[in-house]
Amino acid sequence: MLVTLRRRFFGDGLNTALTLLVLAALALCLPPLLNWAVINARFAPDAAACETLDHAGACWGVVAEKARFILLGRYPADQAWRPFLAAGLITGSWLAAAFGWLRGGKLASALFLAPLLALPLLGGGLAGLSDVPTELWGGLPLTLLLTSAGMAGALPLGIAVAYGRRSALPILRGLLTGYVELARGIPLVAALFVASFLLPLFFPDGVAVDMLWRVLIAIVLFAAAYLSEIVRGGLQAFPAGQLDAALALGFNRWQTQRWIVLPQVLRDVAPSLANSAIALFKDTSLVTIVSLYELTGSLGLALAGDPQWRPFYLEAWLFIAAIYWLGCALLAKVSQRLG
């Protein structure tokens, strides 16, 4: 083991210099960081004790005080088990993918079914669950729902668009190319604004679509454009010899794509698909601008009306950052597993 460590960190002059530089930086930064974050910190939800620190130590009490509001938003407190269960279903499907507990069709079913089951859990109206309007959804369950439902809807659409752009029909190719280039040429913020404020203008009189659904439509269409290019790249790189062999064995074109081409292409581009999921997981924070309060939005609501705890926003944001880091690390593990 010592030989391995020496080869990895002190194998040549450049590695040795970089290792020593990192060790010097750690020696310089870690002691004051530990003093602030652990030794001088306050962990109890006592605002008065935190004020006496004068920011010489972290006030993690703000996390203990505001954790429910940050994690669940304005969801009714007496129904808190529902968003926790919904978040657990989605997180469980990600864990199943990351650690190989499920494979193949079972894994795909779990990834697609988790957000579908989370929706009635959060919304209610079934099995005796009370109705909870989407305006009260928020926090971590909403972030996970937007990510998982967005990917579940965008992947089939992206596959269809990828095949459509390889079609022999020039009008279809042109329309789909225009859609992809338009979606990739605007930021997600613009797509959210269009879905929130312009899309309702095209609905018939008396027809209203909930803000959450409009935002999901925008996310699905936006993400599908990127996923379609990933899938199309995999299709273009697929060996032509396998297509000829499948046709020689009697497979028709549909069977060839269903049983031979698409499974291999999706396996090859799976790491890129997982990277897109990581980007979407972080981009869900943008829905705050259209009054959907996911993790960052819930934190803003939690601190905005409480001047007692507002000065300790840094600790609360570090808590949010840790959640995002854990989510991205889990999705990165999924990328490694699928690759």
Image (tube, rainbow, N blue to C red):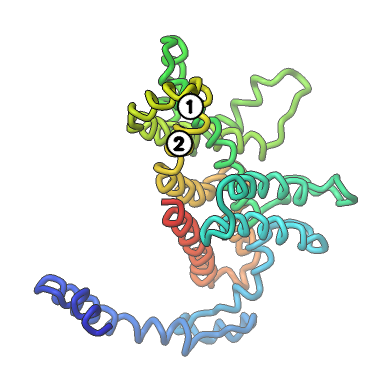
Name which residue lies at 39% across and 81% down. Answer: 33
- Foreground residue among 324 and 310: 324
- Mark 2: amino acid: Leu
Name which residue lies at 24% across and 85% down. Answer: 2
**Label 2 SS:** helix
- Mark 1: amino acid: Thr
Q: Is residue 74 above or below residue 172?
A: below
**Label 1 SS:** helix
- Foreground residue among 204 and 333: 333
Label 2 or label 1, whichever comes before in sequence order: 2
Label for residue 227?
2
Residue 303 seen in render: yes
**Alpha-carbon neighbours of circle 2 within 10 Å: few (<14), some, or many (≥20)?**
many
Q: Quadrant of residue 46?
A: bottom right
- Foreground residue among 191 and 170: 170
Q: Nearer the viewer, mark 2 or mark 1?
A: 1
Q: Is residue 37 above or below residue 168?
A: below
Name which residue lies at 54% across and 86% down. Answer: 52
Give the distance between the C-alpha atoms of the residues marked 2 and 1, in whole angstroms.
Answer: 22 Å
Residue 51 pos. (x, y %):
55, 82
Label for residue 304?
none
Q: Quadrant of residue 157?
A: top right
Name which residue lies at 44% across and 84% down. Answer: 56
Q: Is residue 289 above or below residue 87?
A: above
Decide if residue 71 is on the left or right side of residue 174.
right
**Alpha-carbon neighbours of circle 1 within 10 Å: few (<14), some, or many (≥20)?**
some
Q: Quadrant of residue 196?
A: top right
Residue 62 pos. (x, y %):
60, 74
Residue lying furthest bottom in this view? Answer: 39
Residue 293 pos. (x, y %):
63, 51
Label for residue 256?
1
Residue 311 pos. (x, y %):
54, 71
